[in-house]
Image (tube, coloured by chain):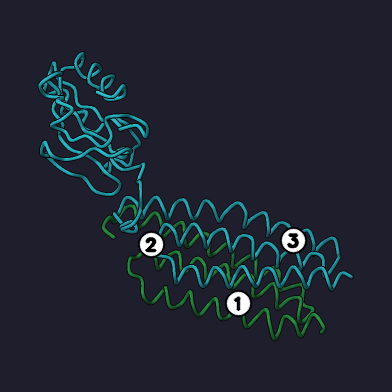
């Protein structure tokens, strides 16, 4: 099995399944911090998917996209945490 | 050879990512979910990025991939800590079967400061009295006795205001409340007698 096939037929579907499971948690909650960590996890999973896609299609430029996504996801989570602490109440 | 190594790494990464997805759905409360998912994704995404570095095998790409790994390793714990801290302050409940919450009572929920005294302003208003908390050690003859049996009030002029047990508190406990190892007693009494009472509780009444 070639590496491209492994990524396209095993790795990316597994990560997409993880993304769906995380999305269920995002919808269900129950509290706002639960949704925030689900969103954070989706950002990190997206970063992993982009990196895997970069290998499968031989596109190393996509690595920069993954780095930017990680940066945005981190800043978003920090902003949410600050907001939660200021606002109070779950 | 490079393909085989990066294939194994990508597969490991996918496995850990899938595990994170299952865990965030199945774990019972926010804190357990968070602890499992941050570890799983750091390892998962880290190994996928490592696979990128090995697969392309060029210095520029490998450097960027390793920088991304370092970034994830640095930021994931920071983000998790900030969310966990905020969640604890806003009162996201712990799992009902949680055994011990060591932060309970040690955080000032208004100023968000860590401190060990429960009611500093109360002591100022009551000169000659001290409020303190005392943990029942694991191996002590006191554990298993009731409050009436250990006679703190009669022998030391010390009153038990509350018993903190795990995630819940017994306020104004009756004499028939039985003490368990790990319970925390909130006591009020004259400072010099408080020390005697603490010694007696540790030594076994």
Q: Quadrant of the C terminus of chain B?
A: top left
Image chain in cyan: B
Q: How would you rate the neighbour count of disc 2 (Cα within 10 Å): few for under 14, some for 14-19, many for 20 or more?
A: some
Q: Where's residue B51, x and y in %?
A: 76, 67
Q: Residue at x 26, y 20 (%)?
A: B200
Q: Chain of mark 3?
A: B
Q: Where's residue B117, x and y in %?
A: 27, 30
Q: CA distance from mark 2 to mark 1?
A: 23 Å
Rendered hue of chain A is: green
The quadrant holding residue A49 is: bottom right
Element type at mark 3: helix
Task: Pick the residue in front: B144 or B3.
Answer: B144
Question: Mark 3 or 2, which is nearer the eye?
Answer: 2
Q: Residue at x 33, y 57 (%)?
A: B97
Q: Residue at x 24, y 41 (%)?
A: B164
Q: Is residue B25 above or below residue B124?
A: below
Element type at mark 2: loop
Kindly identify which numbered label has been placed on residue B189: none
Q: CA distance from mark 3 to mark 1?
A: 22 Å
- Relative to B101, is B110 on the left or the right? left
Q: Decide: marks 3, 1 in contact (CB < 8 A)?
A: no
Kindly identify which numbered label has been placed on residue A15: 1
Q: Chain of mark 2?
A: B
Q: Do marks 3 and 1 share a chain? A: no
Q: Kindly identify which residue carries mark 3.
A: B64
Q: Residue at x 81, y 84 (%)?
A: A1
Q: Where's residue A55, x and y in %?
A: 76, 76
Q: Is residue B6 above or below residue B131?
A: below
């Amino acid at each position: 099995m070639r590496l491209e096939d492994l990524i396209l037929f095993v790795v990316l579907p597994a990560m997409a399944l993880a993304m769906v499971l995380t999305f269920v948690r995002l919808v269900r909650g129950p509290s706002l911090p639960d949704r925030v960590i689900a969103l954070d996890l989706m950002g990190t999973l997206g970063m992993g998917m982009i990196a895997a896609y970069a290998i499968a299609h031989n596109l190393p430029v996509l690595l920069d996209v993954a780095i930017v996504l990680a940066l945005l996801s981190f800043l978003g989570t920090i902003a949410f945490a600050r907001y939660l602490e200021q606002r109070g109440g779950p | 050879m490079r393909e085989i190594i990066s294939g194994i790494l990508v597969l490991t990464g996918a496995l850990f990512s899938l595990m994170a997805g299952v865990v965030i759905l199945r774990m019972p409360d926010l804190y357990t979910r968070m602890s499992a998912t941050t570890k799983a994704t750091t390892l998962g995404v880290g190994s996928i990025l490592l696979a990128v570095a090995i697969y392309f095998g060029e210095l520029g790409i490998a450097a960027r991939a390793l920088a991304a790994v370092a970034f994830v390793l640095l930021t994931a714990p920071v983000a998790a800590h900030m969310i966990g801290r905020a969640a604890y302050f806003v009162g996201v409940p712990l799992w009902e079967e949680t055994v011990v919450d060591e932060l309970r009572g040690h955080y000032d929920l208004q100023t968000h400061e860590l401190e060990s005294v429960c009611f500093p302003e109360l002591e100022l208003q009551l000169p000659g009295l001290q409020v303190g908390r005392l943990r029942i050690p694991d191996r002590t003859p006191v554990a298993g006795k009731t409050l009436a049996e250990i006679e703190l009030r009669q022998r030391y002029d010390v009153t038990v205001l509350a018993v903190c047990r795990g995630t819940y508190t017994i306020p104004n406990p009756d004499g028939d409340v039985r003490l368990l190892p790990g319970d925390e007693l909130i006591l009020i009494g004259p400072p010099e007698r408080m020390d005697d009472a603490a010694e007696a509780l540790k030594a076994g009444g």
